[in-house]
Image (cartoon, grey):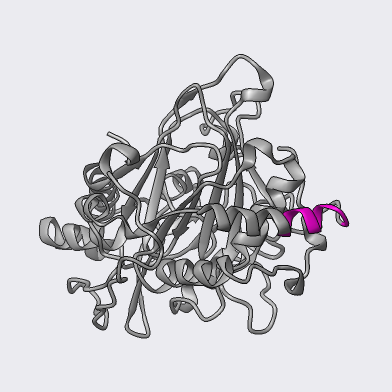
């Protein structure tokens, strides 16, 4: 059962009060946080789903037309260019709920069917900028990314990334504060998106296996999948469950944790760690909420409090109808506090840079291609 079956009427951005209760996070104690939601919470409270109104779309159209007439690359867009007098403040409310509240949002109704590719990219980039600052998503330096099958590649190859395949993806979070996806073309079948509160997974793990939960609070080796910053090893260490400044964050990349065992230099996994990895993945499937993507949908996920997945999909035979999503990875300065361990994921960070700032390897040049590559 997908989103439109679960939610009978969509809420206006201002009609549902955002939950605000949060208590200081303590290691191996239950978490009380507005981002610790259940699937039934999402199904019964539609305040995280936001339909653009006709006036919202008209305002977005005007901004897109203005920029389309004078730029050829979204990297040319300046902060002062992004003027949305009515929609902008509402997007700020959405961003606040993503970063400080539930940790997710879905915006519906961007008119991508009548936009050119550049126009769609402009609209997506400008909406994303209300949430955070784009960062590099891969070794190619993509600030605007594409989720599209690039030839049936497989995750069994450590050179490949899941977004380049038709395969179902394991539950994971991305290596940034917030990930944003916009659907240009859905698949013929499959490709459903599933989301889970990782804070809720943690609370359930505590009830079922405290020792396995504790193992995920320790530093754990992860595979960089051959995207190696200058001066770094092909692996790094980061706990799954992190506690810092009275906040909890979760960094789940189970596939990358397991694939790190390909390095003979690293120690084998303890039984508690194996149990923790298995239980986390099992609970993610048990507690998941599913939604389908339609053209013009924008999904926004806070990686530190949610994990997400995607089912395998079948393509339309026509190349122009292939499943295609645009993607942004965003850093959110002033967002949820991150422990120093997060810096292990990255190369050299600029002074004051957010330690969830994308993938930088030697020779990285930032770009925003309009086609998948």
* Image position, residue 321 (x, y; %): 62, 24
Assign the C terminus to one quadrant of the image: top right
* Image position, residue 96 (x, y; %): 45, 73
> Does residue 222 show up magenta in the picture?
no
Q: Quadrant of residue 184?
A: top right
Q: In the shown orientation, is residue 267 left or right of residue 122? A: left
Q: Quadrant of residue 98?
A: bottom left
The range drawn in magenta is: 63-70
Q: Is residue 359 visible?
A: no
Point out the residue furthest to the left here: 207
> Does residue 68 show up magenta in the picture?
yes
Q: In the shown orientation, is residue 83 left or right of residue 306? A: right
Position above or below: 320 against 362:
above
Point out the residue furthest to the right here: 70
Q: Main secondary structure of the magenta part?
A: helix
Residue placed at 39% from the left, 66% from the top? Answer: 219
Counting every numbered tag in the picture gives 0
* Image position, residue 355 (x, y; %): 56, 73
Position above or below: 191 against 225:
above
In the foreground, 187 or 110: 110
Q: Quadrant of residue 102?
A: bottom left
Residue placed at 61% from the left, 55% from the top? Answer: 328
Q: In the shown orientation, is residue 80 left or right of residue 95? A: right
Assign the N terminus to one quadrant of the image: top left
Position above or below: 311 against 14:
above
């Amino acid at each position: 059962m997908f989103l439109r079956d679960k939610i009978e009427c969509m809420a206006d951005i201002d009609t549902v009060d955002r939950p605000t209760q949060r208590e200081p996070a303590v290691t191996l104690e239950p978490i009380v946080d507005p981002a610790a939601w259940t699937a039934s919470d999402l199904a019964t409270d539609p305040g995280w789903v936001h339909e653009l109104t006709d006036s919202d779309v008209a305002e977005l159209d005007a901004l897109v037309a203005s920029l389309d007439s004078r730029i050829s690359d979204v990297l040319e867009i300046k902060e002062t260019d992004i003027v949305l007098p009515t929609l902008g403040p509402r997007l700020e409310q959405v961003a606040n709920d993503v970063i400080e509240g539930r940790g997710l949002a879905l915006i519906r109704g961007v008119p991508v069917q009548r936009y050119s590719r550049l126009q769609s990219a402009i609209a997506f980039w400008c909406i994303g900028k209300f949430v955070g600052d784009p960062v590099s998503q891969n070794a190619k330096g993509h600030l605007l990314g594409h989720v599209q099958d690039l030839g049936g590649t497989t995750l069994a190859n450590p050179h490949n990334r899941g977004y380049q395949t038709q395969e179902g993806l394991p539950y994971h979070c991305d290596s940034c504060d917030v990930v944003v996806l916009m659907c240009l073309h859905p698949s013929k079948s499959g490709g459903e998106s599933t989301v889970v509160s990782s804070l809720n997974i943690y609370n359930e793990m505590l009830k079922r296996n405290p020792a396995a939960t504790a193992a995920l609070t320790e530093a754990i080796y992860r595979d960089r999948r051959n995207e190696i910053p200058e001066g770094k090893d092909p692996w790094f260490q980061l706990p799954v469950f992190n506690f810092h400044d009275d906040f909890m964050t979760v960094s789940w990349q189970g596939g990358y944790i397991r694939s790190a065992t390909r390095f003979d230099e690293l120690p084998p996994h303890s039984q508690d760690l194996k149990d923790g990895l298995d239980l986390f993945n099992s609970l993610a499937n048990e507690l998941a909420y599913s939604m389908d993507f339609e053209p013009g949908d924008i999904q926004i996920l806070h990686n530190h409090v949610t994990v997400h997945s995607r089912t395998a999909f079948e393509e339309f035979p026509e190349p122009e109808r292939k499943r295609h999503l645009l993607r942004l990875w965003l850093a959110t300065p002033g967002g949820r506090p991150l422990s120093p361990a997060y810096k292990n994921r990255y190369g050299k960070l600029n002074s004051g840079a957010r330690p969830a700032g994308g993938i930088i390897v030697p020779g990285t040049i930032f770009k925003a291609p309009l086609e998948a590559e």
